[in-house]
Amino acid sequence: MNDQTTVIGWRPRPDAGPTRGAARPRPLLVGAYAFPHGDATSNRLLQLARSAAPDGAQTLVVNDWPCEVAVPAGQPGVAGIELVTLRIRGRHHLTRASARLARPLRVLRAVRRAGVGRGDVSVVLLPMALLTLGNWATLRLVLRCPVVVDASERHDRRQFRRGWLTPYFVRHRWSTFLATRLVDRATAVSTTLADYLTGHGLDVLVVPPQVDCDEFRAPQPPPISDGLRLLYAGTPGRKDMLDVILRGISRLAPEHQRRVSLTIAGVRAADAAAHSDLDVGVLDAVSADVRFLGRVPRETVLTLLSESHFSMLVRPTGGYAANGFPSKVPESLAAGCPVLLNHTSDLTAYVHDGVEGLVLDGNGPDDVRSAVERALRLRDEEWTAMSVAARSRARDSFDHRAWRDRVSAFVTAGRGD
């Protein structure tokens, strides 16, 4: 570390013994997010960390907390991982920039302070965004273990108003370029993204977004006859088509709109035009009950999922949407909240029309209208069957326990290289 950095917490597993000289080396995961419960990337890394460790071991996570986000007081520990949180002191951009450049050295110092020596780490897991020459070279050479990257997105320049002039997009493509030259193995969130990496010679395991099914409470929405409760929860940007969702609802017959409520958690109404594709003028044509909640705590999202009949997701069919995998889908299914969506990415394999949700014919307003009309016609027992199927799908296909053997075997393969 350096004098700009402080360790604000080290939380071992309650049953964890001494780390030095451990019988089995364990994975090290490096993050730079509001970990463990922040955005979708934080949630993905949390479950990946839990499934990466072989049975009887635990993953060490060193997280470089982003200085733009306040550290919540009294973060609870997470079973299955040991967490060391670093914090940059000072908010000046030069302070932050120098701390980011020194990140690999700061991570190594944190690992040493946690009592981990050479030979105690079997593999370093890096999200693609953190794959830099400095991180790769320092961690790979000093810890003498392989580096595996996790690829959860592949952006397209058309997503950004300034295209190649967008610094974030340039960094993203540079990290992807490095991954195809520096590492041998990667986990990928979708088959499309895996195919891209495999084409560059990497050994890739497809791991969709994972969840902890035990975290979700039982669904308890009111009868559909009392009104259809729809939910969008997330940070929309321009990848989630809120405008199409609201235009579709506006095309319902007036008597149907009166039976529909839509809660949008993740963006305020005042910010919707700037941060999503939504033309707020469409709200004047909607007589259904539409509520914008802005950013809400995770506990609120879990409550909303348990009280809703369907979560909604409409996306374009190519580019970013084909390479990614919406993490809100596994979370909704785990909550027993069926999904109302169009098929993108690998969703065809997990969400079947009339089983775990209702699948739109396309991604236009009339496709939304038609699907909502179908939802309004459901009997309560039909919805209950869909809810049960959704929870079963989540436990079989997305729970981190179901992935532990496959992920731990993959990331620790080639230990002797």
Image (tube, rainbow, N blue to C red):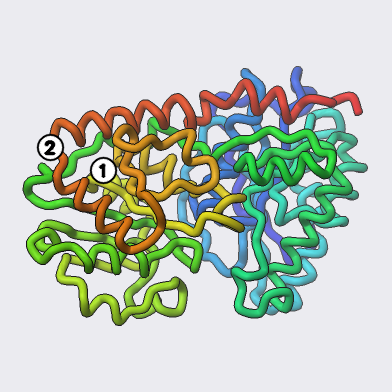
Residue 44 in the image: state x and y as whole percent: 56, 44
| Residue 105 appears in view | no
Q: Residue at x 22, y 79 (%)?
A: 284
Seen in the image, is 319 located left or right of residue 112? left
Answer above or below: position of 334 versus 133: above
Residue 283 is drawn in which quadrant? bottom left
Mark closer to the observer (2, 1):
2
Give amino acid for label 2. Arg
Residue identifier under label 1: 306
The label shown at residue 31 is: none
Among the two numbered marks 2 and 1 on one chain, the one whose residue lies closer to the N terminus: 1
| Residue 233 appears in view | yes
Which image quadrant: the N terminus? bottom right
> What is the crowding at mark 1: few (fewer than 14 residues within 10 Å), some, or many (at least 20)?
many
Q: Residue at x 37, y 56 (%)?
A: 233
Q: Nearer the viewer, residue 255 or 194?
A: 255
- Secondary element at tag 2: loop
Seen in the image, is 44 located left or right of residue 301? right
